[in-house]
Amino acid sequence: MSQTSPRNAGFTEGDMSSHVLRLSGFMIMGFLAMTLAQLVEAAYLGMVGREELAAVAFTFPVVMAFNAATRGIGIGTGAVLARAIGQGDRDYAARLASHGLLLTLVFTMLGAIVLFWQAPALFRLLGAEGHVLELTVRYISIWCLGVPAFGLSMVGSGLMRSIGDPAFPGYVMTAGSVAQVLAGPPLIFGWFGLPAMGIEGAAWAFVLARGGSFCMTFWWFAFRERMLSTAMTGFVQSARDIAHVGIPAGASNLIQPLSSAIITRLLAGFGTSVVAGYGVAARLDAVVTMVVIGISASAAPLVGQNWGARLYDRVDEALRLGYRYCLIWGVIAAVIMWLFGEFFASLISSDAEVIETATWYLYVVPISIGFMGMINIANASFNALSKPMPPLLLSLVRLFGVYIPLAVAASHWFGFIGIFVVAALVNVIFGIAGWSWNRYLIKSLRTRT
């Protein structure tokens, strides 16, 4: 085994900025690949029709919610796993990883069954009607088949980072996304003698591609690093440790898709074109947002391993660098969207109202991307320290105390543009709040050790 292997690698030694950039770089590569795959999927469906674009937009909050809840298990497992690696206990780490993946499999299978069963009622509640509702249900029914494989590869990628491998998770995410982009056209448009399946073809492309991602993840754990254990010894305790962080973290993660669901429901009152425009803009925005998501993803393994090793100054340095990089990228991303947002939207749809809605979103919301990154870094740090309640409380206040009242009022007085302004404002306020609280907590914990 080489010295660079995750068996010996870790984040408790070496230059912290290199660790942040390396972790962030590979995750940005993976996240961007996934986001671009979704963007290309939207472009494919834009060629099929406006109703297909709107149907996929209605799935956004549901897909985000499912992924957020699944990530909660990964966050809970990764928090304990990183500290175990920092303390040098690899056997315990292997059991934790295996138990976390087993919990992920059970949760995703049960969740997919419930979503398949309740899909019509759920999307009707979100405002989908008529043919758009039918298309939405057809898409999500097939998408559910790929959920277990996608969930295992997503959680597995996070656990790889916690163990100390910054590179392979990015390869897993990128390979799956490239496969999805390549599989899309033949299935959607009916190339190479295949029947043209439209929106259902897009869903099948997701299922096939994420199955491939799962195979790569399984190989890493089972053969490359031998981090899979069939022993159920300590499973109950592992489940408790994972749930202690995972349940509140999953609940916190659900706030973002719930916010998206509220936006979708409010925008549905302005018509199908506005919903489709929001869907286009959200996917474009996600491309630049994935950079700060990648940066913030470095916080959990860096904080967890160094805290487990009692290297508190390195924890402070990791967080400081993460916040700085997020704010710098936030400025760059906003300028990019101010200059080219309308052009990017026109590449996906030729509908004037769709482009107008997307352009307004891209003028407003990207201003707050850096602060969104601050929220994510603070939350990752809280969870890595097994302190999941601050992120949950911040998320609940953010949604129910601030976002919903302001968004409803803004939609009434200023239309859909007001909703976008509120979304940006809330990100700024709670990015600063998360940073402040996390800084105070770390100082408090250090004085007790």
Image (cartoon, rainbow, N blue to C red):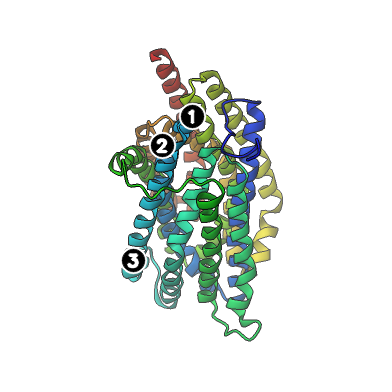
Front position in the image: 144 or 219 = 219
The residue beneath circle 1 is 88
Front position in the image: 379 or 369 = 379
Q: Position of residue 17 (x, y in %)?
A: 65, 29
Q: Residue at x 44, y 78 (%)?
A: 131
Q: Secondary structure at mark 1?
A: loop
**Alpha-carbon distance for marks 2 and 3?**
32 Å
Q: Position of residue 231 (x, y in %)?
A: 35, 47
**Alpha-carbon distance for marks 1 and 3?**
39 Å
- Within 10 Å of disc 1 (Cα), the crowding (few <14, some 14-19, many 20+) is some
Q: In the rendered image, is residue 306 in sight?
A: yes
Q: Amino acid at mark 3?
A: Ile
Q: Nearer the viewer, mark 1 or mark 3?
A: 1
Q: Residue at x 46, y 65 (%)?
A: 146
**Alpha-carbon distance for marks 1 and 2?**
9 Å
Q: Quadrant of residue 239?
A: top left
Relative horizontal placement of residue 264, taking residue 173 as reference (left or right): left
The residue beneath circle 2 is 92
Q: Nearer the viewer, mark 2 or mark 3?
A: 2
Q: Amino acid at mark 2?
A: Tyr
Q: How many marks?
A: 3
Toward the left, the furthest residue is 236
- Mark sitting earlier along the chain (1/3): 1
Task: Using the image, determine if residue 293 lies above or below residue 37.
Answer: above
- Within 10 Å of disc 3 (Cα), the crowding (few <14, some 14-19, many 20+) is few
Q: Position of residue 290 (x, y in %)?
A: 59, 47
Q: Which mark is residue 130?
A: none
The residue beneath circle 3 is 113
Toward the top, the furthest residue is 447
- Mark sitting earlier along the chain (2/3): 2
Front position in the image: 414 or 196 = 196
Q: Position of residue 96 (x, y in %)?
A: 40, 41
